[in-house]
Image (spheres, grey):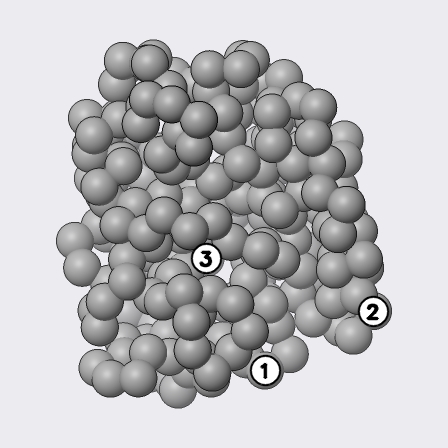
Amino acid sequence: MASDRTDFQNDDFSSAYDGAAATGMLHGAYHFALPDRSDAATQATYLLDHGGAPSGDGRTLPPMLDIEDDPYGDQCYGMSPENMVAWIRSFSDTVAARTHRLPTIYTSLRWWSACTGNSDALGDNPLFIAHYDEDVGTLPAGWEQETFWQYSDSGPLPGDQDVFHGTPEQLQALAADPSTSSGSAGSTSSSTPPTSTSTSAPPSTPPSTTSTPPSTTTPSTTTPDSPA
């Protein structure tokens, strides 16, 4: 995590981010959303100004918005579904205006259904779905395919266990510098990518189309703990 609110920076973020970049791994940053603290544009700008902006090295994943249960109060931050969707849209638009990339959205079906009314308005953004099970389950409205799936909080790899849906080439395209790439700002994951093997797949019945090469990392250096 790089940041949350508009006044917090993770002290460990720079060393983790720079360390991953130095080894040649794909790397990125995420912002833990607290929509009741300030407007979305302010929080998106804070993320981009404090480590979340892509570096232009062709190996930086899009910034990620972590939107889930309020750890300090009401599950949905006291906001109506309509206002929550507008807040997330504003965050996404602010990131896209500066980076020419749509931010990834990390969430769960449970939270998305409760707090956005299962809105389909953000389906162009890459989806990082949290669902701890042997399959990815039902996705929130608007998405036909996840880009990343967090399937467990423990396993053979350090920390949470995540997989990318797609090929190594598609993952690299997601991290490509948009100023030098013809790719779109959204997810590069195809609904029917070539079959490949994941190095961090679940212990049973993994999706046959997931692939996370050994030389890559998912968008965050730490991941919150509230799955579906």
Identity, as a three-letter code, of the amino acid under mark 1: Pro
User: Do the residues bearing badges 2 and 3 touch, measured as CB atoms within 8 Å?
Assistant: no
Position of 82 with respect to 9 (left or right) is: left
- What SS does tag 2 mark? helix
Residue 83 spot, x, y in % from top left: 34, 13
Q: Earlier in the sequence, mark 1 or mark 3?
A: 3
For discs 2 and 3, the disc positioned in front in the rendered view:
2
Identity, as a three-letter code, of the amino acid under mark 3: Thr
Position of 216 with respect to 91 (left or right) is: right
Q: 71 or 118: nearer the eye? A: 71
Quarter of the figure with residue 154: bottom left
Q: Earlier in the sequence, mark 2 or mark 3?
A: 2
Callout 3: few (<14), some (14-19), or many (20+) C-alpha neighbours within 10 Å?
many
User: Do the residues bearing badges 1 and 3 touch, measured as CB atoms within 8 Å?
Assistant: no
Residue 110 spot, x, y in % from top left: 22, 41
Label 1 sits on residue? 214
Label 2 sits on residue? 22
Quarter of the figure with residue 95: top right
Q: Earlier in the sequence, mark 1 or mark 2?
A: 2
Label 3 sits on residue? 188
Callout 2: few (<14), some (14-19), or many (20+) C-alpha neighbours within 10 Å?
few
Distance from disc 1 to disc 3, alpha carbons, whole Å, reads 19 Å
Distance from disc 1 to disc 2, alpha carbons, whole Å, reads 15 Å
Residue 164 spot, x, y in % from top left: 43, 67
